[in-house]
Amino acid sequence: MEGLIAAQQQLADEGVKTNFAKHFTRLAKAWEIVSPDQCLAPYQGDYSWLAQVYQSVKPVSHGSLIWTLLGAKTIELIHNSIDTIDIGTPLEDLVVDSAVIDSVLEDEKKRKKKIVEVEKLLRLRIGAHKGDAKYKQFAEKLDELRQRMQENLISSIDFLKQLLSLAKELLEEEKKVDAPEDKRAKARAALTELFESVRTPETPIVVENVVNDIDTEVVGIVRQFKDAFKSETAKRQIKQRLRAILWIKYQIKDPEVFDRAYSYIEEYY
């Protein structure tokens, strides 16, 4: 742990860090080609260590082409290494533990370890959402915090506090994404309100039945596709099923109602 912190400090300068990345990237490519040849055995420990350093200073949000993804053999080596960082404490527990800051206030060595632990967890967690635009802001904020720390614009205590704050925001965003039932409930509520507004004595529809049909039949189509509303085939099938439910089964032939119902499906499902 102390060695990793020392390495990060030595790579604080952007020029030095970029030069390290260039050389390590070449080394990593060679390692992926030669591994698992036994000739690499004497160098495995040193290489694993360098790979950990590379991962710990690699920008999360952006960077030039020199910051490439590590190969499968290198990643496996890091995971199997006894020198990997201990990140046994879940990010969720660190965020809710009010004693985290107090426990490191008077102990600089312990504080540095905790910073490495939290930052490592954040990088792994953000990396799991690579390509998701909603999480780009978290990656950029983490890189910005690291840069401010390296330039001594914030203290180590403030850096840790802001890392924990960012972790909390990240977890809250994940909860939003991981709560499909909440979105489904919102969809049902919106659809119920829509069909209640068009119900008349002349069209005595049972609103609950209409909503249930849409919630099961139409959503069934949505779930068949990875990104349903980016697929022309999926959108066509969704509209056909919705039209069959509204126009044929329940005789609701108002185009505006159809469009609003479809927009709710697209928004919430």
Image (cartoon, rainbow, N blue to C red):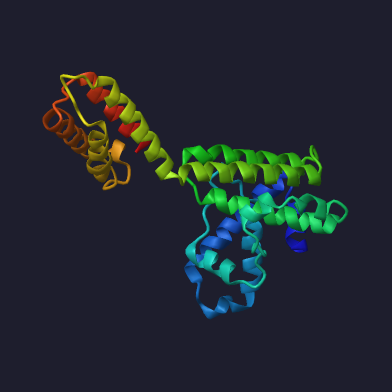
In the rendered image of this protein, does residue 210 appear above or below residue 61? Answer: above
Residue located 33% across and 26% down the image: 193
Q: Residue at x 67, y 64 (%)?
A: 85
128 shown above or below 40: above
Place residue 163 in its image quadrant.
top right
Observer-nearest of 50 and 199: 199
Specify whether residue 67 is in view: no
Residue 168: x and y, percent? 63, 44
Q: Residue furthest left?
A: 248
Q: How many marks?
A: 0
| Whole-percent x, y for residue 102 in the image | 82, 51
Q: Residue at x 11, y 30 (%)?
A: 248
Position of residue 26 in the picture relative to residue 89 (left or right): left
The image quarter in which residue 14 lies: top right
Query: Could you say where residue 180 lies in the image, as x and y percent from the top left?
Result: 41, 44
Quarter of the image with the C terminus is top left
Query: What x and y, as percent, mark residue 77?
Result: 56, 69
Instruction: Answer above or below: position of 193 versus 137.
Output: above
| Rendered-image quadrant of the N terminus | bottom right
Residue drawn at (54%, 80%) of the image: 38
Name the residue furthest front: 201
Figure check: 59 above or below 186? below
Residue 195 in sight: yes
